[in-house]
């Protein structure tokens, strides 16, 4: 298998895992169609493509969330991901 294909496969697996974990419904409104995977800390702020930084949302709720840092998950993985981001951010802010 090519490197490119392996990368694609890994992405697919992560997405499948996130949908499975979050119950295949929008965590905000409960819709089960038009689902997307949202990054709790948007990729534009932090390049974190871990499943811990992902949550299932419908297209509409995702659009409303925009580039804000909001977790609709309350599990340890999501909370520690946000804490990690805030720590990194405050370190960066202090270095400016
Ligand atoms: Zn929704």
Image: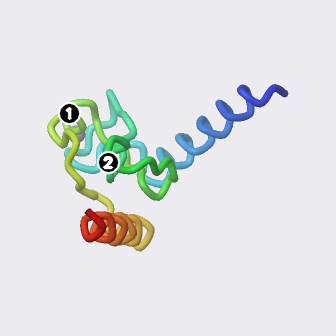
Judge from the rendering whether residue 96 lies leftward or rightward of residue 4; answer left or right: left
Q: Residue at x 35, y 33 (%)?
A: 35
Instruction: Determine which residue is flagged by label 2.
Output: 45
**Nearer the observer, 54 or 2:** 2
20 lies above or below 93:
above
Q: Looking at the figure, which quarter contains the N terminus?
A: top right
Counting residues from the N terminus, which is met first, the one under dot 1 or under dot 2?
A: 2
Q: Looking at the figure, which quarter contains the C terminus?
A: bottom left
**Dot 1 lies on which element?**
helix
Report whether the residue tagged 2 is closer than 8 Å to ligand 1.
no
Q: Residue at x 26, y 71 (%)?
A: 94
Q: Residue at x 33, y 30 (%)?
A: 33
- How crowded is the residue under tag 1: few (<14 C-alpha within 10 Å), some, or many (20+)? few
Judge from the rendering whether residue 34 lies leftward or rightward of residue 2; answer left or right: left
- Going by the picture, which residue comes out furthest to the right? 1
93 lies above or below 60:
below
88 lies above or below 54:
below
The residues bearing labels 1 and 2 have C-alpha atoms spaced at a distance of: 16 Å
Residue 30 percent across, percent down from the top left = 25, 45
Residue 48 percent across, percent down from the top left = 46, 51
Report whether the residue tagged 1 is closer than 8 Å to ligand 1.
no
Ligand 1 falls in which quarter?
top left
Q: Quadrant of residue 63?
A: top left
Give the label on residue 27, or none.
Answer: none
Q: Residue at x 71, y 27 (%)?
A: 4
Instruction: Determine which residue is flagged by label 1.
Output: 63
- How crowded is the residue under tag 2: few (<14 C-alpha within 10 Å), some, or many (20+)? few
- Mark nearest the camera among 1 and 2 is 2
Residue 6 percent across, percent down from the top left = 74, 33
Judge from the rendering whether residue 51 lies leftward or rightward of residue 75; answer left or right: right
């Amino acid at each position: 298998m090519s490197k490119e294909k392996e990368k694609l496969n890994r992405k697919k697996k992560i997405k499948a895992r996130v949908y499975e974990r979050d119950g295949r419904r929008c965590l905000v409104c409960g819709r089960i169609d038009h689902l997307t995977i949202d990054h709790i800390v948007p990729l534009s702020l932090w390049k974190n493509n871990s499943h811990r930084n992902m949550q299932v949302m419908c297209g509409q709720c995702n659009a409303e969330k925009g580039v804000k840092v909001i977790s609709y998950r309350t599990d340890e993985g999501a909370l520690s991901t946000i804490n990690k981001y805030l720590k990194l951010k405050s370190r960066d802010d202090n270095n400016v």
